[in-house]
Amino acid sequence: MTKSWHISRRTVLKGLGSAVALPLLDAMRPALARADEKKGVPTRMVFVYVPNGKHMQDWTPAAEGDAWELPYIMQPLAAVKDQLLVLTGLAQHHARANGDGPGDHARALAAFLTGAQPRKTHGADIRTGVSVDQIAARRVGQRTKFPSLELGCDRGAQAGNCDSGYSCSYSTNISWRTETTPQAKEIDPKLAFERLFSQGKPTEKYRASVLDTVLGDARDLKQKLGVGDQRKLEEYLTSVRELEKQISAATNQPKQPLPDYPKPDGIPEDYQQHIRLMYDVMTLALQADLTRVGTFVVANEGSNRSYSFIDVPDGHHDLSHHGGDEAKQMKIREINLFHVKQLAYFLEKLNGIQEGERTLLDNSMVLYGSGIGDGNRHNHDDLPILVAGRGGDTIKSGRHVKLEKETPLNNLFLSMLDRMESSVNELGDATGRLENLV
């Protein structure tokens, strides 16, 4: 028999300083419908950044429209191809020098979500623009526990000279709360997890599992739910438990130094594991509606990380300046392929989580890309950009759309903000909205 009992979307399981938010359950939908919030299902927005551009010959699809085939670098995305919108022709003009000389890597990341020219300085007078994620957070952030979630795998910095006279703030931060204040990212999956689920200080060390402290609440709740919701709750709590175990195992691994790359403390030595743990944290945050806005910097701009674990011991940035050398280009595309494999892991997780008639990926917009096109040329046009997810059925996916050259990337951001109920008329160098999303 179907149960008619209803609960609030803000219901959490509590115990001993922990609070586990819940995924979207059928029992929540009537209350959400009364709030007239897109029939109870919110839209999410996530930006994933990878540095040093792409090997564009193996990134750009040959055909346009819905008859396109996955190029080499995108092949790991085959399972979610119908959820992809590949956009060619987008540019970020203010990542260019525009009279400021060298510093393409710093400008690439600082301008990526702002569309604003970073002030060339390595002093305290940094300035760029407010990023698109923070504009959305201002408008929808009050509906969730966290207005936005900023994750990364490399440490951020607020000072120092990292790129030809540009502050390290520019090349390590993608999210800007104000024109002069970057939003710091969390790179430790354990601390990110504790921030999401702790009711105390984020740095408190748990003496017991998060789920162990809330099982009483969970048992009481399950008795009141229908069979379908009981299954959803059990699957979600299992995901939380598994992430806890993975983070604990990764934290306790013996430290092994990587060649020419100093690793920060408290995170996994295995880079793939680190990336996937951060994607898992982001997934739980979106699933439980702890936030609707997120950014993830897979590696800081200009990163020279070694990828010896995929038989590419060379530094990423060094390889990106391949000078036409075929052997170096083949190595670059393998690094690009590795990053896309991790993206596929994230997107498939989102696509496997049901939310009413659709999936979490259906109800999301995950933008993946870089502020540099070809790393060898340091160009900021024809950027490698794809949007995964249908934005709550407001985006026609499964296509490759070739836009007019020099179309501002911020035009896409204006269109994405519309779908987040966060419309603005101006953002960086935007000239209008993209009409090609539907």
Image (tube, rainbow, N blue to C red):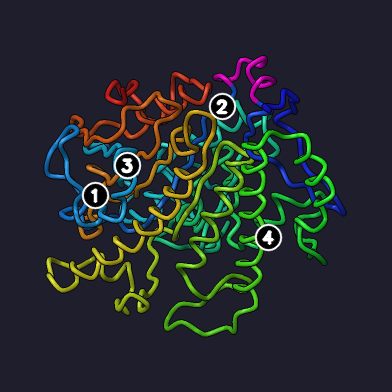
- Residue 202, placed above or below residue 419: below
The answer to whether 294 appears left or right of 206 in the picture is: left
Q: Any mark on residue 339, and which?
A: none
The answer to whether 425 appears left or right of 41 in the picture is: left
First reached walking from the N terminus: tag 2 or tag 4? 2
Q: Any mark on residue 386, and which?
A: 3
Q: What residue do we see at 22% from left, 36% from top?
A: 400
Residue 6 percent across, percent down from the top left:
74, 25
- Residue 26, placed above or below residue 306: above
* Classed neighbour count for the residue bearing mark 3: other residues with Cα under 10 Å, few (<14), some (14–19), many (≥20): some
Residue 391 percent across, percent down from the top left:
43, 29
Disc 1 marks a residue whose amino acid type is: Asn
Q: What residue do we see at 62% from left, 73% from top?
A: 249
Which residue in the protein does label 4 denote? 191
Which residue in the protein does label 1 denote? 379
Of residue 318 and residue 104, the one placed in the foreground of this image is 318
Q: Any mark on residue 41, and which?
A: 2
Of residue 332 and residue 115, the one placed in the foreground of this image is 332
The answer to whether 278 appears left or right of 142 in the picture is: left
Disc 3 marks a residue whose amino acid type is: Leu
* Classed neighbour count for the residue bearing mark 2: other residues with Cα under 10 Å, few (<14), some (14–19), many (≥20): many
Disc 4 marks a residue whose amino acid type is: Leu
As measured in the structure, the alpha-carbon distance from the residue carrying label 3 to the one carrying label 4 is 29 Å
| Circle 3 or circle 2, nearest the eye | 2
Helix or strand or loop: what does disc 3 sit on?
A: strand
Q: Which residues are magenta?
A: 29-39
